[in-house]
Amino acid sequence: MIFVTGVDGYIGNALVQRLLNEGHDVIGFDNFWRRKWVKRDMKSDSAIPIPEMKYKEDLFEKYFKKANFYFSELDIANQGLHFEHMVHDYKPTAIFNLAHNPSGPYSMISRDIANKVLYNNIIGTNNILWAIRKHAPECHYITIGTAGEYDHYGNVDIEEGFFELTHKGRKASKPMIFPRRPGSIYHTSKTASTYLIDYLARAWSLRCTDVMQGVVFGMYTPEIDSTKIYSRFDFDEAAGTVLNRFIIQAILDIPLTIYGEGKHQRSFLSLNDCIQALMIALNNPAEVGNVQTWNQLSEWHTMNKIAEMVKDEADFMPNISPVEFQWIETPRVEHTGDHYYNFITKNLTSKGYSPTRTIKEEINYCLDRLYQYVERIDEYRDVVIPKIIFDKPE
C-alpha cells in the first residue's frame, strides 16, 4: 500500500494515475485547500475543469483495473492523530508527501496566510514523520523540495543536497547540507522542512528522499492523455507558474508580463518528468538513517527566453493574435539581471532519469487543449497581472 498526500493537486493527480497504472494500491489524502484558496483568495480557478474527487474515484476505477484507489478527506497538519491511525492500520511501504502549499506569492499576502503556509508545510511534514517512526519505521518517505530553497545568485554550482566543506584549512568531518537562501516565506517553509527531514532521518533511522525540483510545467503524462483526467492548470499570479501565466496571457491576447529585465534564470521540468523522478525514488529507497537528495530539472532559461518560446508556439496557432511582451517592475525581492546559474544533477541521472518532454512540446500541447476553454478563462483575465508585492505585504 502506498499513501499519497495532496492527491487532488497538480502533481498528486498525475502521480496517482501512474501508480495505479503500474499496479500499486493507493490511499490518497487531501483537504482540498488548493481548490478553496485559489477560488476564495485569488478569485480564480483551473483553466481546465477538474472533476470533484468523488467523480475522480469512479474514473480511476474505470480506467485502472490493476490496482485499487481509496480516498480519505484529511488535513495532514491539523488531523495528525487521524493520519497516524491510518499509518498504523495500513502500514504503507511508501508515503509521497505532496500536501504542501506551493506558492511563494501566496505566502507573502499577509501574516495570517503566511502562518497558514508555514503551519501546513512544516507541521504536516512533522506529523507524517512521527507517524512513520511509530507505526511503519521501514516506510520510505518521499517528498518534493524546491529549487527555490537555493540561492539562485550565489555565483557557484548548486550541489545536490549535501557538500563537503573546508574552512580555514580544516575539512568538515561529514558532508553538510548545501547552503539555502529561500526567496519567499513558502520557500522558507520548505527549507525548514529540509532540515527537519534530515534531523529526523538521522535520529530515528528513517528512509527519506527529497527531490529538489525546478518549476514543473505542462499537462501531459501518458495516463492523463489517455484518461483525460487532467491535473489543475492554474494561471493566477499565486497558483500559476510563469509558464502557465504566459500561456494564458497569449490565449487572452494580453502582453506577456516579464518581471524586471527578464534575464534572471530558473529551472524547469515537465509534469511527466516530475512523475518519472518520483517513480525512480519509489524504486530506489534511501538507506536507513539517510536522506537522499536529487536536483531535478530538464532545462533552465531566462524569463525572456521562456516568453520567446511561448511566442514561437502561440504565433503558429490560428486563433491567437501575435504575442507581445511587456516588461514590468518585479513584484518580488529578486535580481532580474544576468547571473551564473548551474545545478548539479548527477544523482538522478545515474539512476536512469532522462527528460522526455521539452518546454516547447508542452507549450504546444497546452495551447491546443486550453484554447477550447477560452470563454471560461476570459472570466478570470485580471488574475494574471501581479498585485502581490513581496516587500510590501498587507
Image (cartoon, rainbow, N blue to C red):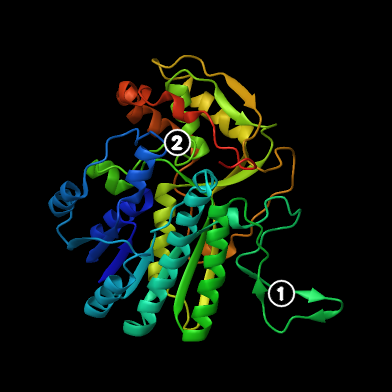
Name the residue that disc number 2 marks. 361
Q: Nearer the viewer, residue 144 or 75?
A: 75
| Amino acid beneath label 1 | Glu
Q: Nearer the viewer, residue 258 or 309?
A: 258
Name the residue that disc number 1 marks. 164
Tell me, yes or no, if residue 124 can be seen here.
Answer: yes
Tell me, yes or no, if residue 352 can be seen here.
Answer: no
The reply to whether dot 2 and dot 1 touch (C-beta < 8 Å) is no
Image point (59%, 63%), residue name: 346
Q: CA distance from mark 2 to mark 1?
A: 38 Å
Give the x, y percent position of residue 351: 49, 66
In the figure, 143 relative to 102: above or below? below
Task: Name the outermost residue toward the right.
Answer: 168
Image point (68%, 65%), residue name: 179
Q: Of marks 2 and 1, which one's residue comes earlier in the chain?
A: 1
Give the x, y percent position of residue 387: 54, 32
Give the x, y percent position of residue 252: 43, 20
Q: Residues within 10 Å of mark 2 (few under 14, many from 20)?
A: some
Q: Quadrant of the C terminus?
A: top right
